[in-house]
Each structure stands twice: as C-alpha cells, then as structure tokens.
Image (spheres, helix red, strand yellow):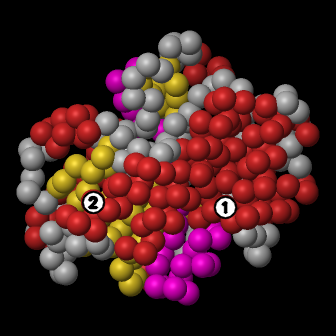
Amino acid sequence: MSSSKQRVILVTGANKGIGFEVIKKLLEEPSSSSNNLILLGSRDLKRGQDALLQLGSPSNVHVLQLDTSSEESIARATNEIKQKYGGQLDVLINNAAIASWNDTAETARDIFATNYYGIKIVNKYLFPLIRENGRVVNVSSGVGAWALHDMTNEIQKKYKSETLTEEEIDGLVKDFISAIATKTIDKIMPNTKLLGLCYSGSKTALTALTRVQARQWSCAKNVLVVSVCPGYCSTDLNNHGPGSRPPALGADSILYVVNTPKADLENGEFYQDGKKLPQSSAFTVNIRDRLKASNMKFDRYKFIVQCIIGENKGQGVKYSCRCLWDSDTDGMAK
C-alpha cells in the first residue's frame, strides 16, 4: 500500500534496458525509499523478479506483471494496483514496445497492437487512477518524425491537425496496416528510404496520440502528457553498435520530463535530452549501411529502432536500433 505522500510510478517494459535504467535512477534520488513507490512492469513475471534482485530488492519497488499487448493482462494489472498499491498513480511511463524489419501484415498487426493500440488501452485503464497533476510519458522515437515527413501531404496534414482525434488516428493506422498487407504502402509513403516501416509508422501514431490525449486530459485532471525519444542506447544484443550511448542517458531523457517542473514543459510535446523535437523531420542517414557496419544478425533478432534528431559529430542525425529477444522468447522491449 502506498502512502498518500509517495509518488507512485509505473514503468512498463522495465525488467531490462532503458526501463530498468529509469528505475535504477529513480532509486538514486534523495529519499527515494520514502518519496517513491515504483512498479516495475514486465510481461514475464520471472524476468521482472530477476530484475528486482539485480536492483537489490529495494522495499519500494514491486514487480507488476503487465503485457501491454493484452487487454486482459492490462485489466488484471489495473486491479492489482487498486488492491495492493492504493489505486493511485502519479507517473505512468509507457516504455514497452516491439519492432521488426519485416513489413508484413502479421508484423504490422503485432507492432501496432503493442506500440499504439496497447498504449491506448493502458492509458484507458490507468488514467482513472492518475492523481491530479500527474504525468503520462509515452516513449516514442524520432523515426516516427521521419516517417511522417515521408508520408503524402494529405496524410501529413491530417496528422498535424490541431483538431485531430483518436478516432482519426485509428483510421490512419487502419489504412497504414492495410497498405502494408496489400503491399501498397507507396501510396502512403511514396519514395521513402526508411526501413522498418511498421515500427516507424507506429511511432508516428503514438506521437500524435500523445498530442490528442494531452488536450483531453489537461482539462480533466491537469495531467501532463508528453512523448520522449531516449536515443540510441548501447546494449549487449546490438553489439554496442557504433555511435551508441549508455542506456542511462536514455533514462535521463525520460526522467527529464518526469522531474522537470510542469511550468517548464509543454503539454503534448515531443522531447529528447531536454529539448523539443519536431513532429516531422527529414531522414538524412543511410540506416541500412550503418546497421550492416554493426554486424547485426537480421534473421535472428527483432529490433527497436530509436532515432534522435540532433548532432552526432557533425552528421546532424543519430540513428539507433536495439535487438530484442529471439522470436521464440519474450519478444518485448524490456
């Protein structure tokens, strides 16, 4: 049970990687044990428990089994928060995501089920638990901005509309998935050079969803809703690829919008390393060549591509990818 004075924070996909680093850094905050009650979200309960052991089993961190692609799992986790942790949240960090280079009908459905629809469902169930002046942080990616830039002018106009609704995003997503399935994606993204279109398209939709829900929820409970790009962070599974940075820096990017005074942030905006990113921006780096240079095994792994727009030794753009579990294991970004 949480104290009314404690800040209750849920991080999804937190048993490893950037989500794990977020929790590590929260534990390093002064008086963290008394100020924060942290829920470590993990699709696999055993992996979540192992992560808790790695953290030293602090008394203020609890594992919450949560598969963000399953409404049944989300509902069960919501009930657990109500029964065990006072039924309140102050910060929700939607970190879990999946990706694949294979732009097929099946992968499109799977990726959007977690990266877009899953977050919509998580937010639907958990928003009633968020206290006044709470925060929702959606971990997105700069490739979403690249993807939007490569879409037709008509679709860009729809995504950028100040009156965009969730239903309209759903329609755009449905059209995107259909185009992938029928191999007509060129009608949506003509002449694009991006790889992993399902992943990048899901992040376009998530960044747009952030803007829409920011409008809705700021009126209801003065809740801050923002999206964040953590950047290209080094992991064992991506062979610590060229140009990567420590996962702790990705966690810093997320925690900036968690801890910065609300007056210094803009509701609905997209941030990386404390700076706002554009909703749409041009793709200028040949990701395919950079990935080949890092000697990754494409046929064995799924990937997350987390790109940030900014300086990288004068190149102007950083790209990233992070290997996930083998397809026969967890398959989630933890």
Q: Residue 107: x and y, percent?
A: 64, 30
Q: Which residues make up the magenta segment? A: 211-239
Would residue 273 appear left or right of 14 to someone viewing this image?
right
Q: Tag 1: Cα neighbours inside 10 Å, few (<14), some, or many (≥20)?
A: many
Q: Residue 16: x and y, percent?
A: 31, 38
Amino acid type shown at disc 1: Ala
Task: Specify the quadrant that holds the C terminus.
Answer: top left
Would residue 334 appear left or right of 174 to someone viewing this image?
left
The answer to whether one can see residue 176 in this image is yes
Task: Specify the quadrant that holds the N terminus.
Answer: bottom left
Q: What label sits on residue 208 in the rendered view?
A: 1
Q: Tag 2: Cα neighbours inside 10 Å, few (<14), some, or many (≥20)?
A: some
Residue depicted at 41% across the width and 44% down the height: 67
323 over 136 or under it: above or below: above
Would residue 286 appear left or right of 274 to someone viewing this image?
right
- Front one among 13 and 33: 13
Q: Residue 69: x and y, percent?
A: 50, 44
Would residue 234 appear left or right of 58 to someone viewing this image?
right
Image-quadrant location for residue 198: top right
Secondary structure, mark 1, is helix
Amino acid type shown at disc 2: Glu
Residue depicted at 45% across the width and 29% down the height: 331
- Front one among 200 and 49: 49
The answer to whether one can see residue 250 in this image is no
The count of marks equals 2
Residue depicted at 77% across the width and 63% down the height: 168
Residue placed under numbered mark 2 in the picture = 80
Image-quadrant location for residue 10: bottom left
- Front one among 255 and 63: 63
322 over 278 or under it: above or below: above
In the image, which is nearer the foreground, mark 2 or mark 1?
Answer: 2
Q: Residue 324: x and y, percent?
A: 44, 28
